[in-house]
Image (cartoon, rainbow, N blue to C red):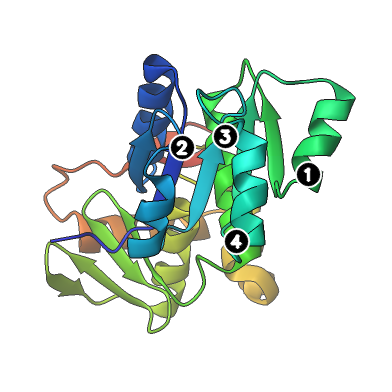
């Protein structure tokens, strides 16, 4: 059975780089489909509806930006990030002119790539009114429900918003000020220093009552990280 997580297509002819990208995206809760060339990609797009594509430009048989330009001509509006060694200003301009939504040059930082993927998915609306999956957590954004291994876990709106904020920023330390602004927002007038700790402890007891799964790591004096 296919998971509810968003699917990302990667076209990269260097296998080790492809595996590195897939590893970090899967770790962040995405499904991936990797291709070593543009062969069979169009056929895949006809049958599937991925949320985003990461495309190298130096590909065998067909230059990556030309391939994307052709997809745009055919009416495909899927968001595209070019991840390439072509780093001249003229290359970057050409990439955007041929249909890029974002452009990252090699060598690259995997964490930055994941953050840019998340940002582009938010801008494109792919993450709105959808189910977001991380590890065995499935969050339904439209009705604010959490499912863990087919079991619905009752959360308050505040707890759901807190968990969703972490799922949208995995493996990143989120400090208390960020969480206050992002989760409590206008209600932050009632916010106290221990508010995050109390809410986090309540959330952890609901989603991991035995503490075996260790979703969160406390970062002393700063905040928490979802791992």
* Identity of the residue drawn at 70% across and 43% down: 102
Which mark sits nearer the N-terminus, 4 or 2? Answer: 2
Residue 227 seen in the current view: no
Drawn side of residue 139 relative to residue 207, left or right: right
Using the numbered discs, state the Cα–Cα distance from disc 4 to disc 3 in whole angstroms: 14 Å
Q: Position of residue 198 (x, y in %)?
A: 41, 59
Q: Position of residue 155 (x, y in %)?
A: 31, 75
Q: Quadrant of residue 192?
A: bottom right
Q: Quadrant of the C terminus?
A: top left
Q: Which residue is mark 2?
A: 38
Which mark sits nearer the N-terminus, 1 or 4? Answer: 1
Using the numbered discs, state the Cα–Cα distance from disc 4 to disc 2 in whole angstroms: 26 Å
Q: Position of residue 120 (x, y in %)?
A: 62, 53
Crowd class of label 2 (few under 14; some 14 to 19; many from 20; radius 10 Å): many
Q: Are marks 4 and 3 in contact (CB under 8 Å)?
A: no
Q: Which residue is mark 1?
A: 96
Crowd class of label 1 (few under 14; some 14 to 19; many from 20; radius 10 Å): some
Q: Secondary structure at mark 3?
A: helix
């Amino acid at each position: 059975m296919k998971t509810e997580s968003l699917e990302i297509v990667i076209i990269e002819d260097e296998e080790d780089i492809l595996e590195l990208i897939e590893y970090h995206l899967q770790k962040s809760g995405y499904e991936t489909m990797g291709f070593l060339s543009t062969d069979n990609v169009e056929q895949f797009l006809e049958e599937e509806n991925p949320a985003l594509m990461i495309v190298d430009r130096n590909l065998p048989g067909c230059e990556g930006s030309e391939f994307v330009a052709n997809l745009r001509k055919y009416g495909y509006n899927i968001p595209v990030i070019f991840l390439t060694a072509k780093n001249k200003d003229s290359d970057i301009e050409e990439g955007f002119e041929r249909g890029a939504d974002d452009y990252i040059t090699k060598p690259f930082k995997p964490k930055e790539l994941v953050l840019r993927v998340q940002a582009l998915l938010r801008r494109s609306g792919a993450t709105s009114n959808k189910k977001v999956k991380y590890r065995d957590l499935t969050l339904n954004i439209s009705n604010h429900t959490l499912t863990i291994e087919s079991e619905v876990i009752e959360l308050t709106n505040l707890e759901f918003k807190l968990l969703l904020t972490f799922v949208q920023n995995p493996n990143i330390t989120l400090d208390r000020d960020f969480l206050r602004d992002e989760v409590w927002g206008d209600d932050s007038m009632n916010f106290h220093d221990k508010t995050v700790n109390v809410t986090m402890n309540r959330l952890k007891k609901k989603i991991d009552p035995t503490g075996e799964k260790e979703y969160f790591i406390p970062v002393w004096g700063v905040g928490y990280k979802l791992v």
